Amino acid sequence: MRSTSTQVIPQKAPMKHANSEVSTVSVETDTDGDHQLFFVTSYSDFDKLAHGPRGTEAKKSLYVYRFHPSDGSLCLLNVQGDAETVVNPAFSRYHPRLNVVYTCTEDCFENGKIIAYKIGPDGSLEQFGDAVDAGGTSTCYLTIDKAQKNLLAVNYWDSTLAVFQIDFETGALMGPMKSMYDPKGGKQMVASAKKDGGVNHSCNDETTISARQADPHSHALVLDPFVGRVAYVPDLGKDLIREFYYDPEGKIEIELNVMPSGLCTGKPDGPRYFEFHPQYNIAYVVNELSSTIAVFEVDRHLLNEINAAARSGENMIRFKGRSTLRLVQSISTIPSAFPTTMNTCGRICVHKSGRFVIVSNRGHQSITVFKVKTKGSKRGELQNVGCYHTRGETPRHFQFDHSGQ
């Protein structure tokens, strides 16, 4: 349901689930159209992860709750997902048009899986189709393209990007991947996984960062919302935002540009997530390691030029080295007195009103709220409103409910 309210109260997964992810699904009922479903996934095998979650391993990895926006209460409806079959489901994406949710599994040693479920109004989950090989390890992010014909997956550990066709009518995953991009150029990983003597990616000391940034580590993939022809990929391992041409056939094969994800201070940034402002030509990047948000101005004219060239079948190589992004601000997510070595940023969200940007701090154990400037030459830039304790540890992921309240 839509709401004109702009009150910023991030909705988090229940604290009893260690390191959960949460996405919201709106389900109308006969009595109250405001009811929503929360689809929550939990880690089930810590040894297979690059980082070191706190808490206990989940015996079941999928949970569905009914959420009541009127009073903020949650009611558990369904628990399923065998922990040995659906291992470490790390990220979920709800289809924008169909009642289908996709989730992906995170494993440093074996390729991830992408699984599609139909969701019933009672919270029931029905897997349809076979799980699809994600084409890489530690699958951590899923995106559906503008045409709703392809699902794009990001594999954190080996940094690969993969594209899979989905059925436009049903949302079903249709067979093996269509295309693959490897920023390592096929080279082997330099660093070892935690289980094999490597570092714990949850830490933020010099030794950990040195090992963590020995390899590329793609962490997300977001298509531009204007023409859908440029894919933005934060590379946490190399402190870069990679800009790719996403062609009309649903392939990622041409890297157009790489852009530093921060101020280039000589210290690591670790870009994690990338979000667009809903009204302005502005994008926000949360830097996990430096505890900063980088604010970028987006070049709509260049995006339109790329789109026009794509429509006319031109060679896209001529756009290499031209960036659609320009850094305009970098702002800290934690108080200056708190050491960045004791914190890593988690999630960033832009409120649907466009008036606020929210980020989570793991270590400082807080949610930081930023107000978006709306006038003048600094429109889209951020002003800190305050940090608010999460009353729990390691706020990795959060999500607004559909009311935005």
Image (spheres, helix red, strand yellow):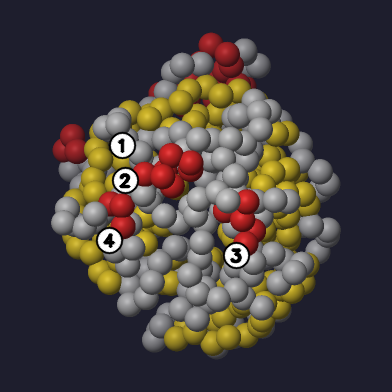
User: Which amino acid type is marked by label 4?
Assistant: Thr
Could you tell me how far apart the alpha carbons at marks 2 and 3 are, in whole angstroms? Answer: 25 Å
Residue 142 visible in the picture: no
The quarter holding residue 327 reads top left
Find numbered disc 4 in the image and state the secondary structure of the residue it sits on.
strand
Q: Is residue 107 left or right of residue 285?
A: right
Q: CA distance from mark 4 to mark 1?
A: 22 Å
Question: To which residue does mark 3 refer?
Answer: 46
Q: Earlier in the sequence, mark 2 or mark 3?
A: 3
Please name the residue shown 46% across and 16% down the image.
Answer: 321
51 vs 138, nearest the viewer: 51
- Residue carrying label 4: 368
Dot 3 or dot 1: first in sequence order is 3
Question: Is the residue under label 4 in contact with that under label 3 (CB below 8 Å)?
Answer: no
Tag 3: amino acid: Phe
Q: Which mark is residue 267?
A: 1
Give the secondary structure at mark 3: helix
Q: Position of residue 37 (x, y in %)?
A: 56, 75
Q: Tags 4 and 1 in contact by the CB under 8 Å rule?
A: no
- Residue at image coords 33%, 73%: 390
Residue 59 drawn at (x, y percent): 66, 78
Please state which of the two labelled residues, at mark 2 or mark 3, is closer to the viewer. 3
Q: Nearer the viewer, residue 303 or 45?
A: 45
Q: Quadrant of the C terminus?
A: bottom left
Q: Do the residues bearing badges 3 and 1 touch, measured as CB atoms within 8 Å?
A: no
State if disc 4 and disc 2 touch (CB < 8 Å): no
Which residue is labeled 2 in the image? 290
